[in-house]
Image (cartoon, grey):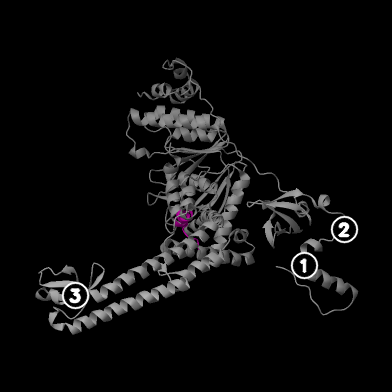
């Protein structure tokens, strides 16, 4: 069953993918599945919130499409000569990387953790400037090299001499010419000579007019200039290729850095696409729980116009595991259950939800059987499809699953359909999963009233206007072959007996003989939710790393020394070769503790401070001085 299509999450994905720039981010979105790790899900939701916050404060990030630059880098590494167009595209991407790094740098003033991705971006300034200086307007610039400039000046001078010579010849033999201007034919500079005078002008006939009355002749005096021009052009072409190969070599040398930048851009593009979607949908960050509780305040369907959508108030959990929703046709029952499941699956994919507030539990599976009762053909095939779908749902769900069913028991005789509906509800209750079911059967409403853990809900109806108001109110209710078909399709005998009992009574359940064998619902091994471990208190976090600890910095796997321990925001400072960076403690792993590396009371200024600062500090301890100590940022 295609759950995403049934609840319209595929349309949300299409809208989401349109907000991404890179092909890799679009592919991740199209293949996105709900998260089962609580820690990963909380991190993904934090990314969504932080990306939206940056967009609202700094505007849309300058993320480039990196598909073309990937191909360019591969070609450069392979040894191909990159043409000017590809080199210009490389420069534009490097400019975009610099702008993105500046954009993220501005975000640091807000303490946004996404801003620290700027430390993973290398701008390749020397390569960018070299391409900018030598490639302009889709061609190698005249000033790319001194030799190239001289050659192009010689070409211009020779072409000018050829034109001047042609003008002199035409003036001297004016009576032989059929026109007053020279022209290029087959790349040769020619003069137009009358047919009868072609022997009067020494040279080579290159072409003739359509009528044959004019011959285009390259004079001998111009031909020598043409040979000289061709030689200069060969040298100019060689010089151009030398410039292009030099730049291509530089691109190939920076391939690893560019590829690392591309990975960061693709990751940021995916994260920022979630922030863009949150803004477009006017969504909010949900709270996540593992306590089997769902609370939605002012929820709406993400694909509906907010101005006409009636807010949905919804709550289930605790002792309530199932809700039976009744109401008139076109009253909004199907939209209501889709809205609940759609917001839940969006939250578990790390997206914001279209609610004013929401607390949503993690679910190990999302399953549904949705069909509009008024459109169902009342025949065997329709009922068979629903039974197959329901049996598959019962096999796949467990106590951490979430199920919605629309018009449960429809498509067959009302009495027997009602019995099967109650049997299915009984099985769902035994599973312990959360479920939402819509129905028209009054017996199902009575079942909900007398069954612990299941409650009724109705879609409100205006009795005065006889129109639905699309509001859910919880706590209030608003001869066929069905059994034979269900048994043949694999429904267990115990469920069929329950259905027959509720349809026709105890005696009928005892005397009914259509069940030939006892089927069993096989429990498939499903997914399990990984709950997050309780966080350590703040004091434990501060003591996690000490000054002088040797640590591994991820994802680059670089070794550094802690120079400032973890602060209240969970960020510490690490000395790397040639620079110091601020980094979240989750991206750092202890290698060797300071107690194993240095003796007690070790002077760490030897590692972290310059010789000049140490001398100045020593002088300050002995006497007054006007010198100052400079600190590296």
Question: Tag 3's secondary structure?
Answer: loop
**2 or 1: mark nearer the eye:** 1
- Decide if residue 183 is on the left or right side of residue 410: left
**3 or 2: mark nearer the eye:** 3
Please state the horizontal and vertical placement of residue 52, each as a whole percent of the image: 54, 60
- Decide if residue 557 is on the left or right side of residue 477: right
Give, as a single range, the part of the protein colored magenta: 62-73
Residue occupied by mark 3: 202
- Name of the residue lying farthest toward the right: 622
**If you read the primary sequence from the N terminus, does the residue marked by circle 1 or circle 3 appear first?**
3
**1 or 3: mark nearer the eye:** 3
> Residue 601: which disc?
2
The Cα atoms of the two marked residues, 1 and 3, are separated by 82 Å
The residue positioned 86% from the left and 54% from the top of the image is 599
> Residue 610: which disc?
1
Quadrant containing the C terminus in the rendered view: bottom right
Q: Nearer the viewer, residue 111 or 612?
A: 612
Q: Find residue 86 and report its image quarter.
A: bottom left
- Compared with 463, 132 (above or below) is below
- Compared with 388, 627 (above or below) is below
Q: Magenta segment: does it hold 63?
A: yes
Please state the horizontal and vertical placement of residue 252, each as a whole percent of the image: 52, 57
For the residues bearing labels 3 and 2, Cβ distance under 8 angstroms: no
Is residue 426 visible to the viewer in this orientation of the structure? no
**If you read the primary sequence from the N terminus, does the residue marked by circle 3 or circle 2 appear first?**
3
Is residue 40 visible to the viewer in this orientation of the structure? yes
The Cα atoms of the two marked residues, 3 and 2, are separated by 98 Å
């Amino acid at each position: 069953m295609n759950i995403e299509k049934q609840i319209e999450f595929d349309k949300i994905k299409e809208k989401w993918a349109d907000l991404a720039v890179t092909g890799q981010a679009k592919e991740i979105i199209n293949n996105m599945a709900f998260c089962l790790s609580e820690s990963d899900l909380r991190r993904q939701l934090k990314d969504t919130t932080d990306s939206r916050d940056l967009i609202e404060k700094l505007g849309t990030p300058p993320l480039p499409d990196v598909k073309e630059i990937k191909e360019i880098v591969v070609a450069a590494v392979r040894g191909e000569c990159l043409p000017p167009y590809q080199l210009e595209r490389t420069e534009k991407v490097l400019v975009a990387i610099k702008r993105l790094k500046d954009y993220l740098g501005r975000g640091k003033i807000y303490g946004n953790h996404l801003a620290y991705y700027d430390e993973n971006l290398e701008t390749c300034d020397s390569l960018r400037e070299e391409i900018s200086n030598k490639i302009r307007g889709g061609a190698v610039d005249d000033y790319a090299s001194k030799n190239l400039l001289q050659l192009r000046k010689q070409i211009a001078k020779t072409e000018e001499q050829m034109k001047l010579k042609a003008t002199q010849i035409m003036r001297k033999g004016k009576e032989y010419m059929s026109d007053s201007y020279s022209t290029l034919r087959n790349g040769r500079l020619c003069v137009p000579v009358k047919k009868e005078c072609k022997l009067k002008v020494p040279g080579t006939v290159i072409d003739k007019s359509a009528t044959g009355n004019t011959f285009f002749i390259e004079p001998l005096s111009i031909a020598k200039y043409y040979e000289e021009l061709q030689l200069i052009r060969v040298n100019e072409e060689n010089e151009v290729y030398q410039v292009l190969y030099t730049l291509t070599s530089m691109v190939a040398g920076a391939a690893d850095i560019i590829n690392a930048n591309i990975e960061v851009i693709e990751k940021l593009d995916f994260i920022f696409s979630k922030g863009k979607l949150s803004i477009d949908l006017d969504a909010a960050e949900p709270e996540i729980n593992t306590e089997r509780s769902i609370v939605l305040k002012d929820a709406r369907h993400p694909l509906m116009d907010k101005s006409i959508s009636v807010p949905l108030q919804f709550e289930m959990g605790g002792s309530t595991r199932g809700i039976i929703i009744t109401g008139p046709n076109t009253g909004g029952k199907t939209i209501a259950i889709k809205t609940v499941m759609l917001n839940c699956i969006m939250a578990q994919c790390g997206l914001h939800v279209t609610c004013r507030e929401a607390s949503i539990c993690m679910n190990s599976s999302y399953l549904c059987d949705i069909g509009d009762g008024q459109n169902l053909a009342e025949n065997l095939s329709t009922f068979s499809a629903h039974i197959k779908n329901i049996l598959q749902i019962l096999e796949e769900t467990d106590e951490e699953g979430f199920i919605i069913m629309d018009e449960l028991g429809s498509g067959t005789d009302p009495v027997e359909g009602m019995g099967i509906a109650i049997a299915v509800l009984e099985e769902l209750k035994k599973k312990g999963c959360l479920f939402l079911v819509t129905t028209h059967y009054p017996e199902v409403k009575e079942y909900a009233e007398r069954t612990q853990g299941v409650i009724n809900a109705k879609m409100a109806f205006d009795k005065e206007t006889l129109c639905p108001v699309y509001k859910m109110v919880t706590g209030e209710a608003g001869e066929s072959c069905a059994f034979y078909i269900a048994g043949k399709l694999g429904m267990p005998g115990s469920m069929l007996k329950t259905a027959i009992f509720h349809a026709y009574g105890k005696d009928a359940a005892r005397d009914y003989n259509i069940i030939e064998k006892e089927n069993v619902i096989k429990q498939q091994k499903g997914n399990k939710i990984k709950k997050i471990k309780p966080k350590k208190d703040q004091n434990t976090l501060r003591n996690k790393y000490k000054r002088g600890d040797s640590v591994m910095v991820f994802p680059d796997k670089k070794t550094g020394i802690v120079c400032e321990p973890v602060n209240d925001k969970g960020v510490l400072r690490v000395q790397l070769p040639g620079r110091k960076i601020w980094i979240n403690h989750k991206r750092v792993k202890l290698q060797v503790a300071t107690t194993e590396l240095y003796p007690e009371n070790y002077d760490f200024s030897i590692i972290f401070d310059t010789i000049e600062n140490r001398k100045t500090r020593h002088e300050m301890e002995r006497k007054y001085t006007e010198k100052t100590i400079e600190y590296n940022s």
